[in-house]
Amino acid sequence: MYPFKKRSVLASCITALMLAGCGGGGSGSSASESSRITSPNINGKPSLERVSAYQTSQHSSDVVECSKAFLNDESCDLAVIQPIGINDQDVTIDQIKQRLVVSDSWMAESFIAALEEINDQDLLNLFKPLNSVVISYDVRPSFYTTSTASMYIDPRYVWRNKAEWDSIHKQEDYRSSFQTEFQVDNAQRYVVQGTNEYVTYSNSYRAEYNEARTTAQIAPGLFRLLAHELAHANDFLPALDLAQVPDAGSINDYIRPLVKLNADLQAYSPIESEILKEAAQIAFQGKDMTDAVRDMTGVEAGAAFEPDKAAEFYSYSHPAEDVAMLFEAYMMYKKYNALSDVAFLAIPQHANPSCNDWKIQWGQRSRLSDAGVKERAVFVAGRILGKEDDAVLGELNGLPLAPSALNYGDGWCESQQVISHASRGAWIEPSSSEEEENLRYLEDFEL
């Protein structure tokens, strides 16, 4: 698949792009400065000190070395390792195993079992632009980087029992402190069309109600993550350019000048809200707070968001995240009949709030049903998957005709089952589940 030669690593620190993921497990305040000093993960950059190849072969050391190149601001040599899908054939799970790098063997075992459970060739083919897939105890959040053309997965997505959970480094997402001055929170969840139940299971271990997970329970959340991160991989190294990868130079130098899908999307149908772009730069990139964003309410955020054709608030953080959120929403509906709830919420002003203390100031169910959002999702999905637009549209035929409004003033958990009279013409009583005690909802507020 790639030649076995002495590897030359090329510096590319200035132009490499790292795109952090938008989810994880657990919530709370960021780590203190003292803990950062001794942490194996500094500002989202893992040490990868314990990783090794899942399968040993004559090429496995090249895969590991490539996966760690970005730690030294270097890239991977195309004379030594090339992306999985360079031959343009359907990707197999066996091929992915050969590029899998992990800190603990259970991570690979659970990941492979979940891929087998998902059983989706469209998803497997999205691995084509990758050099390696890394799952390590110290990865948080998940991310993709052009310097290695590799994907790095937070192991919270694949743990199955307490022993596995205990082997994961516990640290909050480094971005969790960026929103401390906001008066509005944003939330997203996927619910099953028709039942409104969660599609994904919690990524956080809790002895009371989430002490073990089956592969079937892991699969939907992992699928969501993979759809998102692999959208980045295919955005930055599209199929036509993958077919022309040279056999010399660095992967980052090859990717850098390519015309990206996210640029095509912005030219075709850009999102336009300047206040939401400004807010997203603060919330997700750590830019300095401004008075306009500090004073923004959920009503104002929703008024800017609703007509703007973005799938989620995170879409405003970078054009590549705009692509990834659209593709994620499409893939989740295609695979699981999952509808995306998005909302801007008033942040509780008292200690120890419960789920319904987060009050909706604006929200929608089935954001993908918005005509502008759907059109942009079809544009993205067709180009990533190599499908005609009509074929992609056909896969979305079962969507509601339009998004449904979530009731202003309802609590976040209450809104999971209660839909606006105006948009549905019917009232669905809240379930009697123990949602208030089950802290699963906290993951809906994560990045």
Image: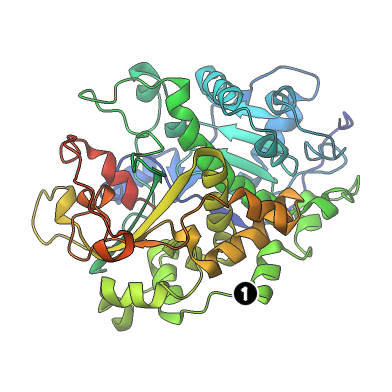
Instruction: Report the residue at 67% width, 43% height from top.
Output: 69
Q: Is residue 214 left or right of residue 237?
A: left
The three-letter code of the residue at mark 1 reads Ser
Q: Quadrant of residue 135?
A: top right
Instruction: Report the residue at 61% width, 41% height from top.
Output: 151
Quadrant where the N terminus lies?
top right
Q: Is residue 410 left or right of residue 265?
A: left
Q: Quadrant of residue 357?
A: bottom left
Residue closest to the eye, 280 or 374: 374
Give the percent coordinates (x, y) of residue 286. Answer: 40, 65
Q: Is residue 327 visible?
A: yes
Give the percent coordinates (x, y) of residue 154. Answer: 48, 37
Disc 1: which residue: 269
Residue closest to the eye, 130 or 29: 130
SS for callout 1: loop
Give the percent coordinates (x, y) of residue 298. Answer: 27, 71
Residue closest to the eye, 383 or 347: 383
Q: Is residue 87 above or below residue 367?
A: above
Give the percent coordinates (x, y) of residue 183. Answer: 23, 69
In the rendered image, the residue lying farthest to the front is: 425
